[in-house]
Structure formats: structure tokens, C-alpha cells
Amino acid sequence: MTVLVTRPKRDSLAFAAILRSRGVESLIAPLLTIVDITITLGDLDGVQGCVVTSANGADALARATANRCVPVLAVGTASAARAREHGFTGVHAAGGNLESLTALIRQNLEPASGRLIQVSGSRIAGDLAGLLARDGFVVERVVGYHADAASGLPQAALAALRGGDLLGVAHFSPRTADIFMRLVRKAGADTFLQSLVGFCLSDAVARNLEGSDWKDLVVAPRSDAESLAECIVLAGEHS
């Protein structure tokens, strides 16, 4: 069985490796291209923690500072793992969404201990700074990368959609889900979704796929790649 993976290339390759270890093949069709922005954060004097809401945010943080001792609050396990790969030693992982991230920060940090720096892409989902401001936290957002949307589906992806050999499509963010649906409709290929399962990392992702005629929409019980892979394997066994 084969699943279409639409994440940025590096993330798609990592997820493809997880699927391959479980006997699932992948067709990679990145719908976002990550473009790095040069930022410098220095020694982070007066900063009590850095917040990353994606693995790409962790990459940008690592490029921006040599300080590997600053606490890193990551939205989920993938962004936390990427931060650890870069050598950050005090990494804390939330449950994969904004609500769990704000809870993690409230539990581990104090507003009076210094400001937070959120390293993110140019587009974000949710207002972390606004949520934490209610508790007295000051969050400075620094844009470390752009995620540029594809203008069309790759021909290999269109051929796979039309060929009927796919089990489904893995969706990791509301934005990529939205881009996928727009490009599928643009190509006139939305009728082929009737035989496919949309595998979603969260309810927020699934909401951007609703209203289309999928065979099924499956939301991972946990917002991480391993959980989504388990859903794909289970669906394949029952297909």
C-alpha cells in the first residue's frame, strides 16, 4: 500500500522512513517549500525560554544562536526531537497543539523570570502571545523562515490520484490540507478522493478537508508522526 505525503521535503522523507519501517510505501509530493530567513538572537540574555511550533522553527532557532542551554518549549514530539538533534539540552515537548503548549509554558515558567522568544514561520496558526499575555508572559515572535506554497500538484501525485493505487493522503497541518484541496480542485481531480482516506494529524487538519467526498477522514489519537503512521497501518490492514 502507498500513501501520498505532502509535507515539506525533509519532513516528508522522515515520515516516509517511519512508514517504510511498517511496510508502507510513500509517494512524496511536498506542497510547501521552506525558505530560510537569516536571524540572530545572540546569547539570549534575559530570555527564560524559546518556543518552537514546528521542526523548521527548531532549525531556525539553532541557526540563530549558539546557546544550547536555553530551555526550549516545543509544540510536539517532532519539533522537540529536532531541537535535541541540534544539541539543545533543556527541551520540553507539549501535546502537539497550541492549548497543550500554553499549558506546558504555564507549568514550567514564570512571567517574572524573563521574556520568551517564539521562533516561527511567517504564517502561524493561533495567537500564542495573546494567550500567554493573560498570565503576564511577554512573548517576542521572530520569523525564521517562509513556507512557500506549491502552485500545482506534481504530475506523479496527479497520476497516483487518478490511478487508484493509493490508500490515502497524509496531512500534517491545516495549511497543507487547505493547499492540497485547492490544488486538487484546480486539477479537476477531487472526484478521485472518493476512494481515498485522509489521514490527519489533528482535528484542526481534518476540518480543512471536510465538505469533500473522501472515503473516510481519520484523525490520529496523538498529534505525532508515530501515531499517524499507526492509523495508516491499521487502515491498510482493513482495506
Image (spheres, rainbow, N blue to C red):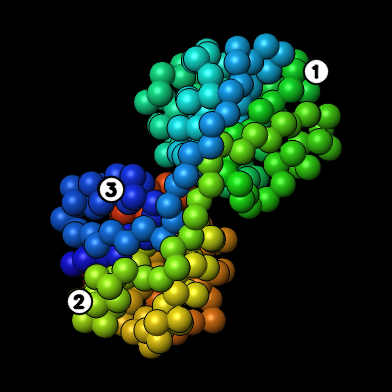
Distance CA(mark 3)–CA(mark 1): 41 Å
Q: Is residue 9 visible?
A: yes
Q: Which residue is mark 1?
A: 112
Residue 212 relative to residue 6: left or right = right
Residue ID for mark 2: 165
Give the spatial CA distance, label 2 vs label 3: 20 Å
Q: Which callout, 3 or 1, points at the residue further toward the start of the chain?
A: 3
Q: Which three-letter amino acid code belongs to the residue tagged 1?
A: Ala
The reply, left or right, for residue 111 in relation to residue 208 is right
Point out residue 20 in the picture as x, y percentages from the top left corner.
18, 51
Question: Quadrant of the image for the C terminus?
Answer: bottom left
Mark 1 crowdedness (10 Å alpha carbons): few <14, some 14-19, many ≥20:
few
Q: Nearer the viewer, mark 3 or mark 1?
A: 3
SS at circle 2 = loop
How far across and down, in percent of the image, does residue 222 sit? Answer: 46, 50
Look at discs 2 and 3 and give the one toward the viewer: 3
SS class of the residue under badge 1?
A: helix
What label does residue 13 carry, if any? 3
Which residue sits at x=80%, y=18%?
112
Whether residue 72 can be seen here: no
- Earlier along the polypeptide chain: callout 1 or callout 2? 1
Residue 77 to residue 7: above or below: above
Q: Amino acid at mark 2?
A: Asp
Mark 1 in CB contact with mark 2 (< 8 angstroms): no
